[in-house]
Image (cartoon, helix red, strand yellow):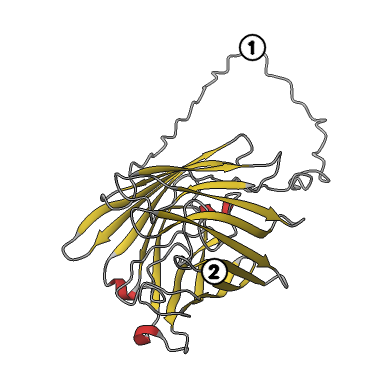
């Protein structure tokens, strides 16, 4: 990094007094300065935070042994004149998930929250094959909080057939600290609409104290009723740029589907995947980035899966334009061994 050492230049003009020239007059009646206005702060214009809207996030997977860094995903964010998110471009690498897709958001009038989101389905849209999109409609209360949404989502059926199934979420806010979310839909081919998931969030000022997400449908392990708990969150003073977006405030992402197993960006945690996890963390909820939190999976009988929580740790590199925003975060977790997921932010 270059360091600039400003040079000090002093200009001196030497006046040689000569007897043939007159000295300048001396002014003695200068009024003293007004002490009632000097050094007083301007209280009429309060300071306003300058928000840095994220334009791009690049995600890498950093494998420890052997040490290999692979690009995983890119997210590109596009805004209208009111700084409302209107498109998110998603690029996947590795030849497994879909290659590229675009999430599109629409609004009613001047509303800041989207009325409809058309998002790519990351599960059934295979690499090089058909790209499937799901549509979700939203309803809000007078405070701008989501109270209900309804989706038609593609679900894997008997390939190559792709089913479409309804999915609804209902939100309630009994007080300033708690949020309840109830999910309903069809869990399996030929099934009826039933409870799929429930979330209980305890948060103060948007900062999660505890989060419990119960999955009522069969998981990849063939179990029912598993739940995930996120707790013991330690926050830093770094601003989470995703929390500044007009689509923030959900514990799952609105930019792709399905998200029925996702908790703060991670759908590969113990409640759905009883093995070494992947330390993904894409958080649209928390106003600040944590330095650590614990995410554990439990059975329906309240037994801690694998007898341990995953301790997530987040290493943050400050931005250059505004150091309270991150330029890079590196996320690890206990059973991810020494592998990490790295996110780079561009504004």
- Residue shown at the point (42%, 62%) measured from the top left: 281
- CA gap, disc 1 to disc 2? 106 Å
Which residue is denoted by mark 2 in the rendering?
A: 192
- Picture coordinates of residue 278, whole percent (x, y): 33, 66
20 shown above or below 45? above
Q: Quadrant of residue 146?
A: bottom right
Residue 19 position (above or below residue 334):
above
Comes first in the chain, label 1 or label 2: 1
Q: Quadrant of the N terminus?
A: top left
Decide if residue 275 is on the left or right side of residue 162. left
Figure quadrant of residue 143: bottom right
Q: Is residue 186 visible?
A: yes
Crowd tier of the residue under label 2, counting other residues whose Cα lies within 10 Å: few below 14, some 14–19, many 20 or above: few
The residue drawn where x is 79% and y is 45% is 44
- Residue 258 at what x, y percent from top left? 46, 58
Which residue has dot 1 on it? Answer: 21
| Percent of width and height locating residue 83 | 60, 40
Q: Nearer the viewer, residue 157 or 31?
A: 157
Q: Dot 1, how many residues are within 10 Å of its Cα: few (below 14), some (14-19), or many (20+)?
A: few
Select label 1 or label 2 by which is in front. Answer: 2
Task: Kindly give the residue lying farthest to the left in the view shown.
Answer: 66
Single out the residue that lies furthest toward the front: 190
Image side of residue 271 versus residue 85, left or right:
left
Relative horizontal placement of residue 202, taking residue 319 as reference (left or right):
right
SS for tag 2?
loop
| Residue name at image x 24 percent, y 55 percent | 69
Towards the viewer: 64 or 131:
131
């Amino acid at each position: 990094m270059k360091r600039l050492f400003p040079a000090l230049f002093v200009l001196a003009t030497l006046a040689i007094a000569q007897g043939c020239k007159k000295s300048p007059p001396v002014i003695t009646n200068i009024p003293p300065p007004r002490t009632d206005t000097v050094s007083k702060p301007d209280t009429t214009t309060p300071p306003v935070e300058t928000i840095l809207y994220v334009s791009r996030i690049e995600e890498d997977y950093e494998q420890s042994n052997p040490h290999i860094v692979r690009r995983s995903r890119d997210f590109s964010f596009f805004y209208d004149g009111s700084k409302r998110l209107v498109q998110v471009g998603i690029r996947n690498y590795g030849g497994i998930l879909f290659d590229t897709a675009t999430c599109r958001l629409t609004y009613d009038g001047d509303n800041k929250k989207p009325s409809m989101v058309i998002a790519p389905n990351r599960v059934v849209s295979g690499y090089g094959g058909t790209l499937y999109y799901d549509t979700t409609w939203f309803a809000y209360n007078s405070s701008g909080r989501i109270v209900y949404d309804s989706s038609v989502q593609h679900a894997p059926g008997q390939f190559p057939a792709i089913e479409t199934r309804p999915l609804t979420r209902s939100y309630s806010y009994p007080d300033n600290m708690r949020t309840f979310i109830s999910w309903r839909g069809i869990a399996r081919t030929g099934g009826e609409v039933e409870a799929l998931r429930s979330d209980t969030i305890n948060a103060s000022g948007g900062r999660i104290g505890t989060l419990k997400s119960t999955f009522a449908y069969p998981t990849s392990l063939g179990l029912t009723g598993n739940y995930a708990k996120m707790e013991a969150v330690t926050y830093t003073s770094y601003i989470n740029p995703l929390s500044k977006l007009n689509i923030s405030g959900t514990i799952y992402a609105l930019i792709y589907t399905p998200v029925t197993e996702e908790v703060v960006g991670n759908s590969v945690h113990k409640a759905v995947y009883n093995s070494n996890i992947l330390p993904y963390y894409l958080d649209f909820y928390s106003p600040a980035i944590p330095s650590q939190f614990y995410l554990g999976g439990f059975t329906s009988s309240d037994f801690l899966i694998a007898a341990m929580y995953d301790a997530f740790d987040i290493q943050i590199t400050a931005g250059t334009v505004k150091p309270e925003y991150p330029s890079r975060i590196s996320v690890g977790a206990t059973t991810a061994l020494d592998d990490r997921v790295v996110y780079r932010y561009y504004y």
